[in-house]
Image (spheres, rainbow, N blue to C red):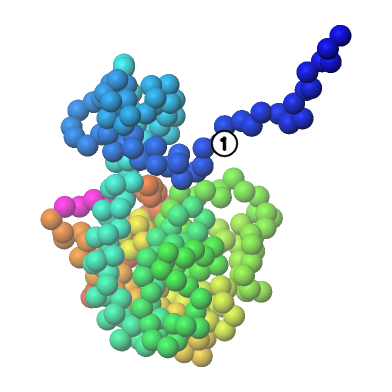
Amino acid sequence: MPPAPALPTTAPKKAAAETPSAVIDRVSLVLDAFDGPGRLTLAQIVRRTGLPRSSAHRMLERLVQLRWLRRSGRDYELGMRLVELGSLAVHQDRLHRAAIPKLHELHAATGLVVHLAVLEGSDVVYMEKVGNRMAAAIPSRVGGRQSAHCTALGKAMLAFADESGRDASDTDLLPRQTKYSISTHAQLRNELLKVRSRGIAFDREESLPGFGCVAAPIGDPGEAVAAISVCGPMNRMMFDQRLVAPVRIAAMGIWQAVDCGPIRVAPTLQQRRPLRGGPALRPTVHDANLRLA
């Protein structure tokens, strides 16, 4: 009797999993198919992309779930998520261009490091940094992130944002960067009440030992689409009108430059929330020299 055939010692190799870069390439290919007005059918998208019909269908349905695309019957079109992100990108580009001269003016007037930032979740994201040799001592960078509750910039925006942490327990701990950092949600809520009432935020060695910041929100009363700050060593910081006034005036000047453009594009991903107990105490240029209560 002939011997039984030997069994294979290794299992057949499965097809290699698609790499993240390949997935992104395919998503880009699908989105690029929508290069004109109107809707597209699955068959049209398959012809334009060259993707297998089953793969294209799975990807389209997932993009619909994520709101990158919208489906109407058997047709697909670009979804609201892309509109939101596009609106925010246009707004932030205009905001950045409007801010640049004001940032340099503020740096020249104070001699301190000046930041422009936006809020993304629980972090601030730096859009610009202007400074001299002092800037090297502050480890922030354009595109970098920092915990919002530890920074004056973050508190200036959190005070006028949706309270994402409103369901958190007062005793829940927040990550600390220094011994002076806010460490509980109760402390943060109390601090944000102060920021809302005075329209200005302070950081006294909360994000970096030996350094402080003064920040003001940028936006209409009751909102903060971004914030501007001055930062420096504690022995050069003045947490009074000597720094508060120029920071506020710079913030108002930036927003006026954005607001007076030919098209007003509001950042749709930053929700507005009305202030509790009345309108924000946001100064005009004429009363910016008044002292805080």
**What residue type is disc 1 on?**
Ala
Coordinates of residue 248 in the picture (x, y in percent): 33, 73
Q: Which residues are magenta?
A: 263-267
Residue 277, compared with residue 35, is above or below; it is below
**Side of 83 where 209 appears, left or right:** right
The image shows residue 90 at horizontal and vertical percentages of: 26, 53
Q: Kindly identify the residue that appears in the image at 73 percent across and 31 percent down.
A: 10
Residue in the image at 30% along x and 53% along y:
89
Nearer the observer, 21 or 173: 21
| Element on which disc 1 rests | loop
Taking depth in this image into account, of 251 and 265 the one nearest to the observer is 265
Quadrant location, the N terminus: top right
Of residues 25 and 184, the one nearer the viewer is 25
Q: Residue at x 33, y 29 (%)?
A: 50
Q: Which residue is outermost to the front?
A: 1
Residue identified by numbered label 1? 16
